[in-house]
Image (cartoon, helix red, strand yellow):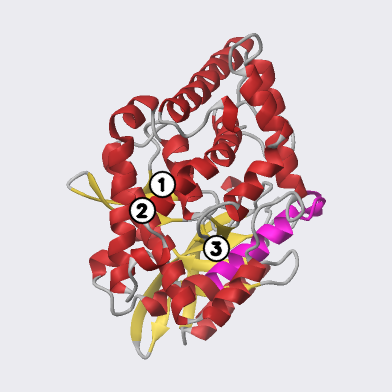
């Protein structure tokens, strides 16, 4: 049985076709049987073809639909997440596209075109440009990004953050409206998400038992909410952040097999936070310990140089809004919240989350597979802790 009826799909595409003056339109899609409904909804690629002013036209689309199954709505989290992403596409990214119209192409942040949005409960949908058709694709052949990919990612993340500061300077009233919609992550604003973070720390304590890391993990568990508060309240400055910036939410475009552009996806957790959070989380969650040990300072330099260049294009000076010294200070302030978030993502990525609404994509079938996955998880988290400690971003005395 299909999870999305053809009638419902046709109704959505009728709106798109009508908005763009398409006549005699038809669409092609992947088979319904291959579409999985999960906690976060459904991603459906569509090719919409028709005639416009006598010419044949084709739209290559992605439909992002919220779950229609009420079982996935029980916590209310999905409803909030889709409302947040709809707001991002209809307000924030739309405004960013206007701001950077006159920017050189090499400085522009990549924003998929949004063709149609519907916000009705259980019928939420975002119809956007299929970036795969534009040559973008996810990085799937390794668990971590290599140096070329992380550099490209940080450059585009810096552009996203710079656009937030430029928007605040140009339209403070709109920025205030956005701040009310994209509230910081706290125990009050998202208790369920914080509960998930704490649960994964409990699981980490089991996997790390009888190791030197137990005191750190215990303190992270005890003061989890405090560290997320600090990422907003105790930093030098904040902006509109992605909130879940790791390799799973980035697509890359290539020339001669080298990444030349990046496109960020999945804006459900967009929120006001320190830009240092997005940058630090991306680095520790998406690179190997070997790469961090060799190139961490280069990566941070790359981020900030791109941030500064984008600000200048928007008529601002980094020394006026967010200096390098501020950024460096904030990196230390947010490191504990980043570590907690990375622990959750790495647990999920390695196939270890086998229960609940949000489960690992990778299915572990045997005790041997589970043990190998657990060993890999422990090794990755251990590397992050050691690197943060070795670089001075965390010590037990800070906790």
Pick the residue in front: 9 or 86.
86
- Residue linked to disc 1: 328
Which residue in the rendered view is the most extreme toward the left?
256
Residue 380 relative to residue 287: left or right: right
Q: Secondary structure at mark 3?
A: strand
Q: Which of the labelled discs sits on residue 324, or is there none?
A: 2
- Tag 2 and tag 1, C-beta contact below 8 Å: yes
Pick the residue in front: 89 or 48.
89
Bounds of the magenta segment: 69-90
Residue 111 position within the rendered picture, expressed as x and y whole percent measured from the top left:
41, 66
Determine the main secondary structure of the stretch shown in magenta. helix
Q: Which of the labelled discs sits on residue 48, or is there none?
A: none
Which residue in the rendered view is the most extreme toward the bottom?
53
Categorize mark 3 by other alpha carbons within 10 Å: few (<14), some (14-19), many (20+). Answer: many
The answer to whether 87 is drawn above or below residue 172 in the figure is above
Residue at 69% x, 24% y is: 218
Residue 335 position within the rendered picture, expressed as x and y whole percent measured from the top left:
52, 39
Categorize mark 2 by other alpha carbons within 10 Å: few (<14), some (14-19), many (20+). Answer: some
- Camera sees residue 246: no
Q: Which of the labelled discs sits on residue 63, or is there none?
A: 3
- Camera sees residue 331: yes
The CA distance from mark 2 to mark 1 is 6 Å
Pick the residue in front: 380 or 280.
280
Q: Is residue 295 magenta?
A: no
Residue 256 position within the rendered picture, expressed as x and y whole percent measured from the top left:
17, 47
């Amino acid at each position: 049985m299909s999870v999305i009826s053809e009638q419902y799909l046709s109704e959505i595409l009728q709106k798109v076709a009508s908005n763009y003056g398409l006549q005699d339109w038809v669409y092609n899609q992947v088979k319904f049987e291959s579409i999985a409904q999960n906690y976060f909804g459904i991603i459906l690629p569509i090719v919409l073809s028709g005639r416009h002013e006598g010419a044949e036209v084709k739209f290559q689309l992605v439909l992002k639909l919220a779950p229609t199954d009420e079982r996935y709505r029980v916590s209310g989290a999905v409803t909030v997440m889709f409302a947040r992403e709809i707001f991002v596409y209809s307000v924030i990214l739309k405004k960013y596209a206007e701001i950077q119209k006159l920017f050189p192409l090499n400085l522009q942040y990549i924003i998929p075109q949004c063709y149609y949005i519907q916000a009705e409960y259980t019928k939420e949908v975002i119809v956007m440009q299929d970036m795969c058709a534009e040559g973008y694709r996810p990085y799937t052949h390794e668990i971590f990004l290599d140096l070329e990919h992380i550099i490209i990612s940080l450059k585009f993340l810096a552009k996203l953050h710079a656009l937030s500061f430029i928007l605040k300077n140009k339209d403070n009233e709109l920025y205030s409206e956005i701040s009310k919609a994209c509230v910081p992550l706290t125990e009050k604003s998202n208790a369920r998400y914080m509960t998930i973070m704490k649960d994964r720390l409990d699981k980490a304590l089991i996997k790390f038992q009888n190791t030197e890391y137990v005191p750190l993990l215990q303190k992270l568990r005890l003061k989890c909410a405090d560290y997320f508060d600090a990422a907003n309240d105790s930093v030098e400055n904040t902006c509109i952040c992605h909130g879940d910036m790791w390799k799973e939410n980035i697509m890359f475009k290539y020339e001669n097999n080298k990444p030349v552009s990046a496109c960020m996806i999945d804006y459900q957790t967009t929120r006001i936070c320190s830009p240092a959070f997005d940058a630090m989380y991306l680095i520790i969650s998406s690179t190997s310990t070997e790469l961090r040990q060799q190139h961490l300072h280069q990566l941070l330099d790359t981020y900030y140089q791109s941030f500064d260049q984008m600000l200048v294009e928007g008529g601002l000076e980094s020394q006026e809004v967010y200096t390098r010294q501020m950024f460096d200070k904030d990196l230390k302030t947010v490191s504990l919240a980043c570590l907690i978030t990375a622990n959750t993502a790495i647990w999920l990525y390695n196939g270890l989350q086998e229960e609940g609404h949000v489960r690992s994509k990778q299915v572990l079938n045997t005790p041997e597979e589970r043990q190998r996955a657990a060993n890999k998880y422990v090794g990755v988290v251990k590397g992050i802790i050691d690197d943060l400690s070795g670089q001075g971003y965390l010590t037990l005395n800070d906790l």
